Image (cartoon, rainbow, N blue to C red):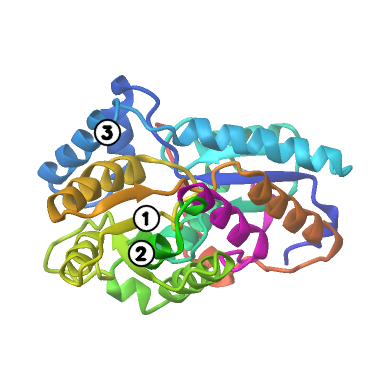
Amino acid sequence: MISSVRSADHILLIGFGGPEGPEDLDSFLAEVTRGMAIPPARIAEVKHHYEAVGGRSPYNEYMFRLADRLIARLRSHGVWLPVFLGMRNWHPYLRHVTEEIKREGFNQGIGLILAPHRSDSSFDKYIRNVEEAKVFANAAGLTYEYLPAWFNHPGFVAAQAAQIQPLVADLTAAERESTVLVFCAHSIPASMAQRCQYAEEFECTSRLVAQELCWENWQMAYQSRSGRPSDPWLEPSVERVLEELAQSGTKNVILVPVGFLCDNVEVLFDLDVEAKAAADKLGIAFARASTVMDHPLFVDMLAEEIEGMIQLPRRLPLTQAIVEQTRGLAPITAV
């Protein structure tokens, strides 16, 4: 049984990770696709996406900055728990960070998975990764409780609305009327979506952000799908939504990547390059809002949730079904 979070002795931020230079691309993509039947042509395509935006991802940089600001915010409120950052696919690898956590003698952590909407790939898999890292580090006694869902938290909503505000602040009433906000999130397989509330959470966030801005003209779109073309994934795609808006006479769109916490490659290439090119071709004026990244309102929200967990035990027990899937694993070999 997981012990009360009142006794938490550290905080673990858990992220995807990203390559920090062109020399990292092949190793990073090999790590991401490990054990998956991904055609080489698709991997080469993704590599090109990274090369097109400088051969690196700013993901790690943003996440370290978020961690630094979260630490500062917690310290200012008297929370002195050490904060660790572990990545699934790049340095600092989660498995190595878990080794460090064990060496330092910590036992009970608060886990923060860096994704706003929950599915098997964006949440459950990360919990399994933590369990695998514990096996790798021989840290069976290490336990975690995870932050409650925050896709509808007023702080997250306000932070995303604040990132849109600079793009709409000077619009006239007529311009507001003719501008459509298109909220974007990573597509997932339809079969996966049937087993979770991912689409519903995405819709809720989008609606709340639009309400925060008093914006009536908005839509949702999915991006960055992969897998076999014959397999159904969540739709409509960003490209399809842009085509439909053009057909309806829309002249201005603002894309809002509310499904992402930082301006990673899915944002910098899939939206800023591909979606912009599609909008230009359709004659639609294109703008893209920033993600929440390390916005003060977002940092405050995370800190408040952590503080609440320290005060209120067992707000989100570790899903036993997810843990069960990782039991009996052999030790993982370091990469």
Magenta region, residue range = 139-167
What residue lies at 23% left-to-right and 67% top-to-bottom?
Answer: 245
The numbered mark, 3 or 1, whose residue comes first in the sequence reads 3
Q: Nearer the viewer, residue 57 or 13?
A: 57
Where disc 1 sits, the SS reads strand
Task: Using the image, tell me which numbered label, if any, was put on residue 198.
Answer: none
How far, Cα to Cα, is label 1 from label 2?
Answer: 6 Å
Q: Which residue is mark 3?
A: 50
How far, Cα to Cα, is label 2 from label 3?
Answer: 29 Å
Q: Is residue 92 something that shows in the picture?
A: no
- Label 1: few (<14), some (14–19) or many (≥20) C-alpha neighbours in 10 Å: some
What residue type is disc 2 on? Answer: Val
Where disc 3 sits, the SS reads helix
Q: Which residue is mark 1?
A: 254
How far, Cα to Cα, is label 3 from label 1?
Answer: 23 Å
Which quadrant: the C terminus? top left
Q: Nearer the viewer, residue 86 or 275?
A: 275
What residue lies at 59% left-to-right and 61% top-to-bottom?
Answer: 157
Q: Are marks 1 and 2 in contact (CB under 8 Å)?
A: yes
Residue found at the far right of this picture = 78
What residue lies at 34% left-to-right and 28% top-to-bottom?
Answer: 56
Task: Using the image, tell me which numbered label, if any, was put on residue 180.
Answer: 2
Which quadrant: the N terminus? bottom right
What residue type is disc 3 on? Answer: Tyr
Residue found at the far bottom of this picture = 194
Question: What percent of the width, then of the height, locates residue 234?
Answer: 28, 70
What residue type is disc 1 on? Answer: Ile
